[in-house]
Image (cartoon, grey):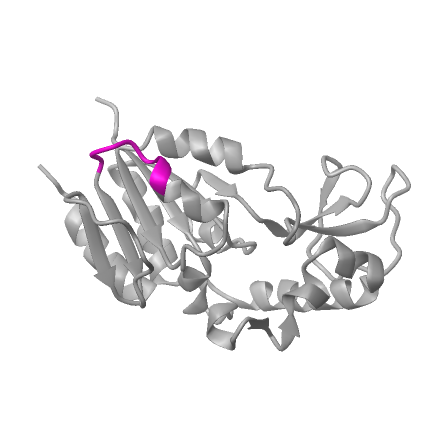
Amino acid sequence: MSKPHLVVLTGAGISAESGLRTFRDTDGLWEGYAIEEVATPRAWRRNPKLVLDFYNMRRRDVRAAEPNAAHKALAALEAQYDVTVITQNIDDLHERAGSTRIIHLHGEIFKMRSDRDETLVEAIHDDMPEGALAPDGGWWRPHIVWFEEPVPMIGRAAQVTASADIFLVVGTSLQVYPAAGLINMAPAGVPVLVVDKKIPPVAPSPHLVLIEQPATLGMQEVLARLLNRP
């Protein structure tokens, strides 16, 4: 008998309790930087050193962080569910917690790509030096989907969401599109659970469960609801 398909959308709130800060907790600033300075293609063209320095700091932060109880709870759900995690986060905490199927919508901090060819991607675990050239002659840049850029994985994420038996949202304000629109792509009538310390606006539904808790606490309630069901 096949396992029910649980599709999970995660955002910065699930990693905040591992010490990784979020935009919304810092008045739209990320570690003191405006997103226009460090997270757009124009910022890269204008000041690549600043952008690289910023993401080098982020990479160090992620290396120092550890998966928390919410990440581990999602991995534990694989015992009874076919789980796909769709994350807006660029960290690798889901992987380190043990989740096995993850779609990174906004890129991955431990990868770099050519600024000429987005399909030319390599791993990077240490600091990225300024001016390093990819094999195609482009500059290596962080493998991050910046603001004002298309989201290549959104189509795959939409397909996965459309096949969900249960849809779970953890730690996202549902304000960044197109990721925020995925909640509307779950099949009609499937249970939708939303976990966040401040519940974002969502359309009312008899199948909607709102858990207004930080991710680590809220995921304990999710485990109690979803594991060992008859």
- Which quadrant of the structure image shows residue 64? bottom right
Task: Give the magenta part as a residue range.
Answer: 184-190
Left or right of residue 228, residue 119 in this image:
right
Left or right of residue 218, residue 160 in this image:
right
- The foreground one among 95 and 205 is 205
Which residue appears at 21% of the width and 22% of the height?
A: 1
Name the dominant secondary structure of the magenta segment.
loop
Furthest toward the left, the residue is 230
Left or right of residue 75, residue 79 in this image:
left
- Which quadrant of the structure image shows residue 163? top left
Which residue appears at 48% of the width and 52% of the height?
A: 96
Q: Residue 42 location, x and y as percent?
A: 77, 57
Q: Residue 8 location, x and y as percent?
A: 36, 44
Vertical position of residue 145 compared to residue 52: above or below: above
Vertical position of residue 173 compared to residue 27: above or below: above
Q: Can residue 40 be seen in the rendering of this structure? A: yes
Which residue appears at 73% of the width and 43% of the height?
A: 122
In magenta segment, residue 186: yes
Left or right of residue 139, residue 156 in this image:
left
- The foreground one among 120 and 172 is 172
Q: Can residue 99 be seen in the rendering of this structure? A: no
In magenta segment, residue 133: no
